[in-house]
């Protein structure tokens, strides 16, 4: 009993540190977080749950699920950072609980525990659980649909098909038609169960269609062209979206997203595994999705997130059954050296791009700790205590995430987020205009301002926000000599 209580307490602490600690320690980042959060806030204020609006104008780039989640966060009285982010973190945690229980039913306790530890501490899943964008809700809804689909494909259960279809519909509400494409292998596997397949498709349509029909009825061709043509067909096949990447782009992205569990890929694909139809279904769904995303002209790292649960669901049972795992888990522990390196390079990488960011030196302390952890997990595995080895590696990953938060979040808030700048602007917002800024800073300032700040070319005000390429934006007097007391107002 005591051991179970201690294990539960340790798991609770790890979950808090991984997913909730520091969630509002950084202002909203990039162009997407403040933009999507502003749309959700507008829904909460206006009560219009159909039309996404960005500062008064209809915005048809993405469907409504994330906006609804954010709006509920604002209705619940959460702050500017927690209202958009906390619902995503809670969705991530709820899916992990479901993932663990579903895999335990399919593959047993040990395999499900391994798979859940891998997913919960993988770099990609943790990272996207901290940002208010669509990728995590899509991944959670689609992957839950995938796992529930095991039942109706095997037995023809209409109930299971309806639940899986409803989850697929939620995924469609999260990010459009992408999950429909990813579900193509499930339709193929279930083709011999036509009644269940009908319930699967029907439930998906009933869940997703009302918002699409309502938005199309209200906005007509403008919605259809922008949402379906530009942000589906053009995003897949045209270079106009400006996220063009080579075909092999997702190979290193997958390797990075699975850190520190990437080395376990070497034991996750053995011929003897494929006699199990459930593993074949997972593998085919993963490979189909990987090729589908790789074939698209435009690629972003987050697009791959819906495939992480499937690959972890394969790696968990494989790790539980493998004869030897020492080299893989020890190498995974060595990869944790990326945590302090990432903490050092992340702020500059987000500001100017990874290719132009500096290469900081790695301190000796973290490197020594990582090597000691690698030796520990290797020894535990060699001693026949694989559960302890996996737990130690998961704990090391959680510690790496905590180190990154403590080291990088203050710098991100100061140099990458606009929140610190907004605190300077807020007392004199009526006197401030914006010169041309990178869209991340412009969207962020407008989010915190609620009512967008005017452009300086439209209104020549005493203070203006300026930005030099590659540097944070800053507040400065337009004409210092013409603004009495401007220096003291700015703290000069």
Image: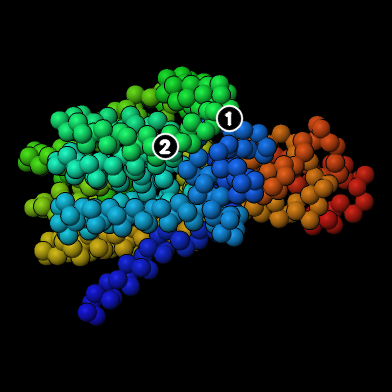
Q: Is residue 470 left or right of residue 428?
A: left
Using the rendered image of the protein, determine whether residue 196 is visible from the camera's viewpoint.
yes
- Kindly identify which residue carries mark 1: 218
Using the rendered image of the protein, determine whether residue 26 is visible from the camera's viewpoint.
no
Comparing 209 with 355, the one in front is 209
Which class describes the residues within 10 Å of circle 1: few (<14), some (14-19), or many (20+)? Answer: few
Q: What element carries label 2?
A: helix
Q: Would you identify the image quadrant in which residue 171 lies?
A: top left
Q: Quadrant of the C terminus?
A: bottom right
- Kindly identify which residue carries mark 2: 208
Q: Is residue 412 left or right of residue 14?
A: right
Residue positioned most to the bottom: 2
Residue 383 in the image, given as x and y percentages of width and height = 11, 65
The Cα–Cα distance between marks 1 and 2, rounded to whole angstroms, is: 16 Å
Which class describes the residues within 10 Å of circle 2: few (<14), some (14-19), or many (20+)? Answer: many
Q: Is mark 1 on a helix, strand or loop?
A: helix
Look at the numbered discs 1 and 2 and tell me whether their residues touch, using CB distance below 8 Å: no
Q: In this view, does 107 lie to the left or right of 436?
A: left
Q: Would you identify the image quadrant in which residue 141 lies?
A: top left
Residue 215 in the image, given as x and y percentages of width and height = 53, 32
Q: Is residue 219 depicted above or below 138 in this figure?
A: above
Q: Quadrant of the N terminus?
A: bottom left
Q: Of label 1 and label 2, which has the lower sequence position?
A: 2
Residue 444 in the image, given as x and y percentages of width and height = 63, 44
Q: Residue at x 71, y 48 (%)?
A: 449
Task: Please count the marks in the image.
Answer: 2
Q: Residue at x 36, y 60 (%)?
A: 398
Q: Residue at x 66, y 54 (%)?
A: 420
Residue 304 in the image, given as x and y percentages of width and height = 36, 37
């Amino acid at each position: 009993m005591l051991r179970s209580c201690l294990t539960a307490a340790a798991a609770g602490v790890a979950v808090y540190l991984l997913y909730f600690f520091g969630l509002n320690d950084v202002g909203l980042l990039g162009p997407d977080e403040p933009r999507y959060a502003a749309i959700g806030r507008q829904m909460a204020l206006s009560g219009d749950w159909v039309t996404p609006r960005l500062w008064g104008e209809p915005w048809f780039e993405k469907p409504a699920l994330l906006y609804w989640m954010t709006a509920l966060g604002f209705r619940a009285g959460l702050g500017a950072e927690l209202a958009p982010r906390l619902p995503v973190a809670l969705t991530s945690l709820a899916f992990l609980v479901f993932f663990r229980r579903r895999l335990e039913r399919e593959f047993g306790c040990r395999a499900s525990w391994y798979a859940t530890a891998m997913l919960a501490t993988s770099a990609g899943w943790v990272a996207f659980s901290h940002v208010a964008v669509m990728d995590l809700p899509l991944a959670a809804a689609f992957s839950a649909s995938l796992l529930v689909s095991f039942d109706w494909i095997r037995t023809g259960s209409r109930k299971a098909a309806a639940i899986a279809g409803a989850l697929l519909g939620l995924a469609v509400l999260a990010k459009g038609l992408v999950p429909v494409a990813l579900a193509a292998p499930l339709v193929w596997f279930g083709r011999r169960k036509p009644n269940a397949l009908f319930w699967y498709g029907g439930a998906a349509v009933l869940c997703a269609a009302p918002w699409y029909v309502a938005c199309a009825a209200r906005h007509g061709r403008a919605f259809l062209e922008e949402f379906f043509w530009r942000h589906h067909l053009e995003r897949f096949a045209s270079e106009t979206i400006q996220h063009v990447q080579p075909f092999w782009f997702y190979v290193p992205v997958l390797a990075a997203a699975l850190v520190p569990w990437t080395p376990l890929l070497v034991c996750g694909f053995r011929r003897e595994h494929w006699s199990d139809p459930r593993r074949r279904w997972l593998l085919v769904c993963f490979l189909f999705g990987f090729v589908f995303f790789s074939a698209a002209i435009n690629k972003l790292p987050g697009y791959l997130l819906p495939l992480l649960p499937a690959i972890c669901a394969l790696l968990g049972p494989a790790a539980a059954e493998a004869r030897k795992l020492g080299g893989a888990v020890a190498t995974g522990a060595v990869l944790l050296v990326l945590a302090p390196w990432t903490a050092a390079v992340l702020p500059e990488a987000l500001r100017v791009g990874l290719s132009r960011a500096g290469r900081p030196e790695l301190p000796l302390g973290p490197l020594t700790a990582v090597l000691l952890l690698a030796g520990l997990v290797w020894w535990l595995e060699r001693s026949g205590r694989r559960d302890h080895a996996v737990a130690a590696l998961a704990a090391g990953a959680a510690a790496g995430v905590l180190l990154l938060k403590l080291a990088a979040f203050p710098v991100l808030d100061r140099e990458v987020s606009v929140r610190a700048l907004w605190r300077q602007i807020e007392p004199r917002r009526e006197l401030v205009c914006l010169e041309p800024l990178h869209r991340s800073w412009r969207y962020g300032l407008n989010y915190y301002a609620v009512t967008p700040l005017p452009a300086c070319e439209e209104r020549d005000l005493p203070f203006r926000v300026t930005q030099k390429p590659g540097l944070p934006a800053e507040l400065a007097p337009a004409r210092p000599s013409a603004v009495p007391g401007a220096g003291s107002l700015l703290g000069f």
